[in-house]
């Protein structure tokens, strides 16, 4: 039973447009959510996070939105750049136990010039 | 500053054998987490070590074990290998286990034949 799901395995957008990556979770006890970016042949790198007490967190071109009632979070990238092309993983954890994160399968984002 | 180093990068083993993978965290980091990445399963948490103690454990069989040494280097062992153990094994290091500060290694690609 997968607790964190990224239902879109891939997404393609035009440079300059908005990229929206989605993630759903089933365990309402999760209270901390993270997004990671992974380039081929590299390990994932942390991108942005949000705790359950917030519904939005921004960092430059990246914004994460959390809808607790729907158990849904999304990552918005505006404007999208070709260098953003990568696999994006969302992860959920418990704030008091951040060493154990549950990851989604990932969404491959391709930003076309 | 050196990143997270995983050795070996690639490994081929036969069913029934055992394997040991190594992870050297960033200097000063005390937490090391291990993940298994397979197509369609995303990143699955194996276990986390902090100051030589296993602090968290995922839902993997007892064939998967690990340890951490006093210098924070960690090893992961898989005994009685099965074909389904073929995966990319990633380790992540952080100061405290907080994954907003975690750095991942490039991974070890294990193929079981």
Image: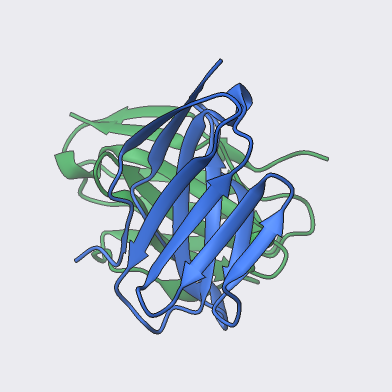
Residue A14 seen: yes
- Where's residue B14, x and y in %? 20, 32
B1 vs B110, left or right, is right
- Where's residue A57, x and y in %? 65, 64
The residue closer to the viewer here, B14 or A21, is A21
Chain B's colour is green
The residue closer to the viewer here, B92 or A71, is A71
- Where's residue B64, x and y in %? 32, 59
Residue B82 seen: no
Please state, as top left, top right, bottom left or bottom right, where the N terminus of chain A lies in the image.
bottom left
Q: Residue at 77%, 38% (x, y): give it.
A: B2
Q: Residue at 28%, 49% (x, y): give it.
A: A7
Determine whether B14 is above or below B23 in the image. above
B24 vs B67, left or right, is right
Q: Residue at 18%, 43% (x, y): give it.
A: B84
- Where's residue B67, x and y in %? 50, 62
Determine whether B59 is above or below B22 in the image. below
Q: Residue furthest right?
A: B1
Colour approach in the figure: by chain
Determine whether A85 is above or below B53 in the image. above
The residue closer to the viewer here, A53 or B46, is A53
Chain A's colour is blue
Q: Residue at 56%, 15% (x, y): give it.
A: A113
Determine whether B87 is above or below A68 in the image. above
**Would you identify the image quadrant in which residue B81 lies?**
top left
Q: Residue furthest front?
A: A17
B79 vs A22, left or right, is left
How many numbered markers are drawn? 0
The residue closer to the viewer here, B66 or A3, is A3
């Amino acid at each position: 039973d997968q607790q964190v799901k990224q239902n879109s395995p891939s997404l393609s957008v035009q440079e300059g447009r908005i990229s929206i990556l989605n993630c759903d979770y089933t365990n309402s006890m999760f209270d901390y959510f993270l997004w990671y970016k992974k380039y081929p042949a590299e390990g994932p790198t942390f991108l942005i996070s949000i705790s359950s007490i917030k519904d939005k967190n921004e960092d430059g071109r990246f914004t994460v939105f959390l809808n607790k009632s729907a158990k849904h979070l999304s990552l918005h990238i505006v404007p999208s750049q070709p260098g953003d092309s990568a696999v994006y993983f969302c992860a959920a954890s418990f704030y008091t136990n951040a060493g154990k994160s549950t990851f989604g399968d990932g969404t491959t984002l391709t930003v076309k010039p | 500053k050196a990143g997270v180093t995983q050795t070996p990068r690639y490994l081929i083993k036969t069913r029934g054998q055992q394997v040991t993978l190594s992870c050297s965290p960033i200097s000063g980091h005390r937490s090391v987490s291990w993940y298994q990445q397979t197509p369609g399963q995303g990143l699955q948490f194996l276990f986390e070590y902090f100051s030589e103690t296993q602090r968290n454990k995922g839902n993997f069989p007892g064939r998967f074990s690990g340890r951490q040494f006093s210098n924070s280097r960690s090893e992961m062992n898989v005994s009685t290998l099965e074909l389904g153990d073929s995966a990319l094994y990633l380790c992540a290091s952080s100061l405290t286990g907080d994954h907003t500060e975690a750095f991942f290694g490039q991974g070890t690609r294990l193929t079981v034949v």
